[in-house]
Amino acid sequence: MGADTNMFSRLQNIVFDALSDVAAERGVKVFVIGGFVRDLLLKRPSKDIDIVVLGDGIGVAREAARRLGNARVSVFKTYGTAMFKYKGMEIEFVGARKESYSPGSRNPSVEPGTLEDDQRRRDFTINALALSLDRDDRERLVDPFNGLQDLHDGLIRTPLDPVVTFSDDPLRMMRAVRFATRLGFRIDAVTFEGIKSNRERLKIVSMERVMDEFNKIMLAPCPSIGIKLLDQAGLLELFFPELTALKGVEYVDGVGHKDNFYHTLAVLDGVSKHSDDLWLRWAALLHDIAKPLTKKFVDGQGWTFHGHNHVGERVGGRVFQRLKLPLNEKTKYVQKLVFLHMRPIVLSEEEVTDSAVRRLLFDAGDDIDDLMLLAEADITSKNEAKVKRFLTNFQIVRQKLKEVEEKDAIRNFQPPVSGEEIMETFQLPPCKQVGEIKNAIKEAILDGIIANNPDEARAYMFTVAAKIGLAPSPD
Ligand code: ATP
């Protein structure tokens, strides 16, 4: 099978021509390898180019960079690699190498090797394809492990015995799932067995690297595929026991609850259809995380999960910490959505009053659209009539949200009367009463007693002050 590779872009051709020239002059062989070749054959865009040199990779990098307008070369001597950027592309060079691993470490000992040695150390056959940049046989595909066939068949397979590949570098187990999820490929049965039997070795990989891969899975068009694979392989429970704890259905007196693991995955996919935002996807993944902790069977009510949103907000924070995810405004955003996730549904079940909508807008602020997306995706019932009723009610909530926001501008609520103004008007030092008045004004706006404007707010301020026995200062 030949490769249809006559499709380098103009810029890529400039780079490859320069490399062919340098290779010819130095009498060395140079190949494009890895993800770039895979994506080229799949007709997927890719920015980064990996080059393997049978010889001095750093020297070839320096000379090629010189010819391409003197790009600055970063050299990593310890690894024998070099990199430069050219018009938005990152071009990485490595001398062909052979790696051998010792158990307990992810850092192999490395020695120069042949092209095939270099291809052997790659994770999957589809990532081990190489294209020659030799002037004489430019674009010849070097494919000792049938990677091209696997690309056609949509198969993730290791070039060597999977037990060796995964034991050498257990991060590859996460990468297998990532590629399967992103490309919509199957993991070959023997390869999958290799993952299962090596799963415990994931423990030697740092959480940051595991999360790098996990987040790439989360960003795939249908992330549930990857999470189910991680679960089936026995990897998920190793680093995310809170999520696997959602699995299963319990029955009391013949009454069961839904399986919250599969429900969560359906919500995650639902949100992912409408948004590429990683953190909104995380909010979907964590929205019911505290259900196992709050689950109770109550006679006459069936299964209840009281306060699971509130507990979930805390558990979510702890999960972020343990998984070494960023602890910043993104964590707060995820926690906020977990906490609020039921509000639009509860609202839509009742008569949708303006004041309830105003309170929702106030609490969600700028995250209201994301919250609505999450709440809508949360409706995964199989009962079509129920789903229809909810979705219709949601339309009403959305419409009301729009109307109320246009009228009252609650989304980015700023107190219409400041604390300073209250202090000046009643000659007060900073004290509890100032807060009380401010809060009373806010509540009156949210309840629709007054409109959100300074005139009505000021008038109301005097009413509240009079009630607590305050008089304005004479001037
Ligand atoms: P993407 O750029 O979409 O993340 P990629 O395959 O290009 O995908 P990189 O992580 O940049 O991913 O890796 C480039 C190449 O290096 C891979 O195609 C593969 O050949 C090799 N590679 C990367 N990581 C590993 C690993 N852990 N084990 C073996 N080979 C690897």
Image (spheres, rainbow, N blue to C red):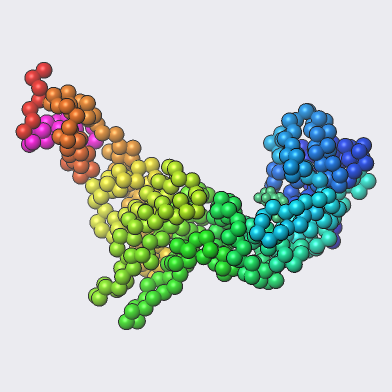
Say which of 462 and 84 sits in front.
Answer: 84
Estimate the x, y position of residue 313 in percent, counting from the top left: 37, 53
Query: Is residue 470 toward the left or the right of residue 34 in the image?
Result: left
Q: Is residue 390 above or below residue 256?
A: above
Q: Is residue 389 magenta?
A: no
Q: Say which quarter of the image contains residue 426.
A: top left
Estimate the x, y position of residue 108 in percent, counting from the top left: 72, 54
Q: Is residue 458 magenta?
A: yes
Residue 252 seen in the figure: yes
Q: Main secondary structure of the magenta part?
A: helix
Q: Is residue 326 above or below residue 392?
A: above
Estimate the x, y position of residue 339 in percent, counting from the top left: 35, 53
Name the residue rendered at 39%, 50% in the picture: 335
Total residue callouts: 0
Quarter of the rendering occupied by the C terminus: top left
Q: Say which quarter of the image contains residue 390.
A: bottom left
Residue 284 seen in the figure: no
Say which of 29 and 88 sits in front.
Answer: 29
Estimate the x, y position of residue 74 in percent, counting from the top left: 72, 35
Query: Is residue 202 toward the left or the right of residue 442 in the image?
Result: right
Name the residue rendered at 35%, 42% in the picture: 365
Say which of 46 and 345 sits in front.
Answer: 46
Name the residue rendered at 33%, 65% in the picture: 294
The stretch in magenta equals 451-468
Outermost residue on the top side: it is 475
Name the residue rendered at 52%, 60% in the picture: 239
